[in-house]
Image (tube, grey):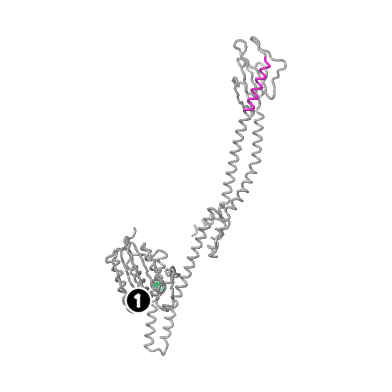
Amino acid sequence: MKQKSNGNLSRKSRKELSIKQKVTLWYACMLVLIVLLLFGFIFAISRNILQRQSDSRLEEIVLEFADDIDFEQNSYELDDDIRFYENGVIFSLYDEQGRLTAGSVPTDFPADTILKAYSFQTISSSGNTWSVYDAALPYGDGQILWIRGILQSETLFSVERTMFLVLLIACPLLIAVALLVGYSITRRAFLPISEICRTAETIGAGGDLSARISTERTQGELRQMADTFNEMFQRLETSFEHERQFTSDASHELRTPIAVITSQAEYALLPDATAEEQREGLEVILEQARKMSSLISRLLLLARADNGTQQLSMAPLNLSYTAAEAAEQCRETALRHHITLSCEITPDIIAEGDQDSLTRVFLNLLENAIQYGRPDGFVKLFLEVQDDFAVCSICDNGIGIAPEDLSRIWLRFYRADPSRNPGGSNTGLGLSLVKWIVEAHHGSVSVSSVPGEGSRFTFRIPLRQPS
Ligand code: ADP
């Protein structure tokens, strides 16, 4: 107990992000990631283009510089107006052995940078980066003059710096906008979910069971979800309504015999009650007590059926014999009602089922057929095998059932015409029990009836129960 409350406490104290916040965060992270990737891509491409532009410019300038050198037999001469610094490029000249003969190199430029004819090199040192282009000019008999052009990569750096600055300013802005927009989109998208939660909370708190989620502005999957919840709420409401009806009917049914028992006992206990009157009173009390006991056992069975604790002892049984026995038990009642009871039973139909429950099914249907039959009428019981099913029909030519009552007679305590059995033993539970028992045997039960002409109840159960 103690542990549990500690667990609750720690769960409460741990602040968890709501789904909305999580979705917003994911959305913002994804957006920032995409923008960063896009930026990186643009940066890489523009850097490449700039690099190429600067290389071709460097090459051009170096080759122009070469034009200012006049070569003779075994020597060369530099023009008077030659400049070793032109358009940001610093020039230096080297002999075949790589010795610097004219011009200069920037401070910090590594002196050991190898000469590579007509190719570009990027050299970095002490935080500086240079683009280098070397031209090898042959002259005389096999001599070579190297011209090296060095360009400080200022332009490239400035582009990188600008992009970094833009990113630095844009990123927090982007995150803020992504969070704001993301949250408002998620909030709108989650509105129906919040409403579902609110409705569920109202119902959960024992509030209005008829509350439903409004689906006016909801579409797609959320509409589907809201519909599913509404259907569930509808079923809950119906089920609660049945439960309430059942409890009120049950207490009503029990109140009547208790009232009779109380009044009979009080009457019998009167000082001037004769022995005969006391005996009559006791008989009534006994009859009411039996009725209550039967009602209670039916209610108990239904309650157990509801919560799945009613056990059926399934075993192979001779259904033909069970049906004939039940008919035999009803013969006297049929006689009393001037009703001819006849049976057409295929012998030795063996089915797997619970003997007591199936006997109850036969008895209930036969008793109803007799009770709602007409004097000098008939009740017929048919039992046969159809495909892998035992099929039983019980027909009468009695009062029949109105079409609007056909679906309701299976409900608990439902009686189409209670006035037909005032104070009698009918509780309106018989058919709900029949339905439950037949379905528990993996079978089905149905009715067809014409008011004033009679009814036919048919149930079918499989001969072998599925394992
Ligand atoms: P009850 O205890 O009232 O017979 P049931 O559940 O067995 O309860 O039947 C429910 C209602 O169905 C009855 O009250 C009656 O109105 C109707 N009913 C059942 N069987 C027949 C029948 N054979 N003919 C006409 N009505 C019937």
Q: Whole-percent x and y of residue 303?
A: 42, 67
Q: Residue at x 44, y 76 (%)?
A: 418
Q: How would you classify the magenta stretch by its main secondary structure?
A: helix
- Position of the C terminus by quadrant: bottom left
Report whether 255 appears left or right of 201: left
Name the quadrant containing residue 201: bottom right
Q: Whole-percent x and y of residue 174?
A: 63, 43
Q: Secondary structure at mark 1?
A: loop
| Front-most of residues 100 and 420 | 420
Q: Residue furthest right?
A: 81
Total label count? 1
Q: Amino acid at mark 1?
A: Gly
Camera sees residue 413: no
Residue range corresponding to the magenta coloring: 52-69
The residue carrying mark 1 is 377
Name the quadrant containing residue 121: top right
Q: Considering only vertical position in the picture, is 228 above or below 144?
A: below
Magenta residue check for 237: no
Report whether 11 appears left or right of 74: left
- Ligand 1 visible in quadrant: bottom left
Q: Considering only vertical position in the picture, is 129 above or below 302?
A: above
Q: Whole-percent x and y of residue 260?
A: 43, 81
Magenta residue check for 55: yes
Q: Considering only vertical position in the picture, is 217 above or below 138?
A: below
